[in-house]
Amino acid sequence: MSLRTRFAPSPTGYLHIGGARTALFSWLYARKHGGTFILRIEDTDLERSTAESVNAILEGMTWLGLEYDEGPFFQTHRFERYRELTARLLAENKAYHCYCTRDELDSLRAEQMANREKPRYDGRCRHRQEPRSGVDPVVRFRNPDDGDVVIEDRVRGRVVVSNRELDDLIIARSDGTPTYNFTVVVDDLDMRVSHVIRGDDHLNNTPRQINILKALGAEPPVYAHVPMILGADGARLSKRHGAVSVMQYRNDGYLPEAVLNYLVRLGWSHGDQEIFALDEMISLFEIDNINHSASTFNPDKLLWLNHHYLMHADPAHVAHHLRWHLGQLGIDPAKGPDPVEIVKAQRERNKTLVDMASSSAFFYREFDQYDEKAASKNLTTEAARCLEALQIRLDELADWERSSLHQAIAQTAEALGVKMGLVAQPLRVAVSGTAVSPPIDLTLEILGRDTTRIRIQRALEFIGGRG
């Protein structure tokens, strides 16, 4: 049988970091072994599942580049199949109708708790032959009475669970809708899933699912239960730790490859290597190298990785993502410098694309005002003399390119008998509005002759107006 993995999120919220890591591990394993990666939307929770959540999952997968080979499949489209197999289990006496009311089950639970027993269904309807008037029954799976379920987990090792610890779980509700543990089994069976990689919060479900699979005459897939992700305080990762939507990382200025690189190292390692190109992840990834213990989410590490990718990725690729962030500022990147040149100029001093877009806005549009501190220090009467002299030299330049611009600034400073910074820094504030920009000669080259002249003149008027 060919290798087939799946990612099966529930559309009750966004695609979060933990889900994205599960998707990545499943995707990598399929890609490494020439297998098939399936996307399945487990939307049988009709009250909580939303179209917005489905879109958020699909958008997150697309942004991360985790393309799926089959799907997305929706469980709500497969109800007839679930009913078919429920009827089959009933016909084979591997399932039965349970007519217990909620009050009866609550009373049973209270009694067991009082006796310090493990709360569980006691099978009282297992041998019922007749329907119960006025009660719509659920369908329960007839779990084996003895023996063990053995899980040869690829991460946790051998896990053995006694069937005596498992009760008869509900596989169909009283309205006929299937339950999670049953739909998962049927889907994995029909979709020929060979390897299930998922969070270890699902481990308790696995013995039940294996028993149902065997009752349907199927061989269970290989399981790999991945430890959870923790916050820095040791608690389970939540929104307060940064467990936000994957798309929030896009909004915050992270590159998808930085997020993928960070996710793959959350619980998996290859020696001491920290930086992995996508092809390297695929070639090196093995389930057996997934850590047995929980991983800790570290926002600073993610930020460090993002800066690495801003610095070393193809500038055209970074520019592709920068354009979106410029658009969020109301900037049309087609009306101004090539974003590729902006990336080259700005990537060393910016750790996120949000920062890069914000600090680059002056290349595309006029700024409303000067930074107050920068203007007070640099746009002075003495600075006006330097800017006026510099403008004369700039007007004389035949070629508007970096080396000529640098020479013009240096010659102006020399002619005035001042340090170069006394020309360059007022110029920087004049053209950018702040005391921080890429090297000033590069900044002028990107801005162009006309915009530079307009902004120097504006600065001179500002100085004159204050004087």
Image: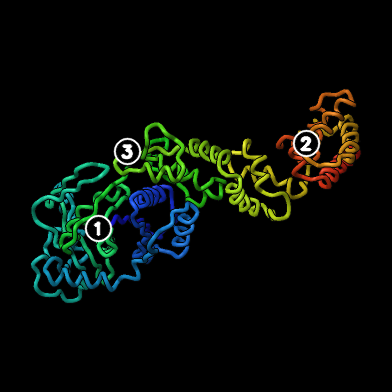
**Which residue is painted at 13% across and 52% down in the image?**
163
Tell which of 87 and 351 is nearer to you.
Answer: 351
Dot label at residue 428: 2
Dot 3 lies on which element? loop
Q: Which residue is mark 1?
A: 1
From the top left corner, tell me how far across and down residue 34 is, in percent. 34, 53
Q: Which part of the image, by quadrant, shows the C terminus?
A: top right
Residue topped by disc 3 = 291
The colour scheme used here is rainbow
**Left or right: where 175 falls relative to 15:** left
Task: Find residue 120 and report its horizontal and vertical position in percent.
Answer: 17, 55
Foreground: disc 2 or disc 1: 1
> Which percent across, then down, holds residue 156?
25, 42
Amino acid residing under circle 2: Arg
Mark 3 Cα shell of 10 Å, populated few (<14), some (14-19), many (≥20): some
Q: Residue at x 11, y 68 (%)?
A: 93
Choose the circle earlier in sequence order: 1 or 3.
Answer: 1
Of the two numbered discs 2 and 1 on the same chain, state the one appearing first in sequence.
Answer: 1
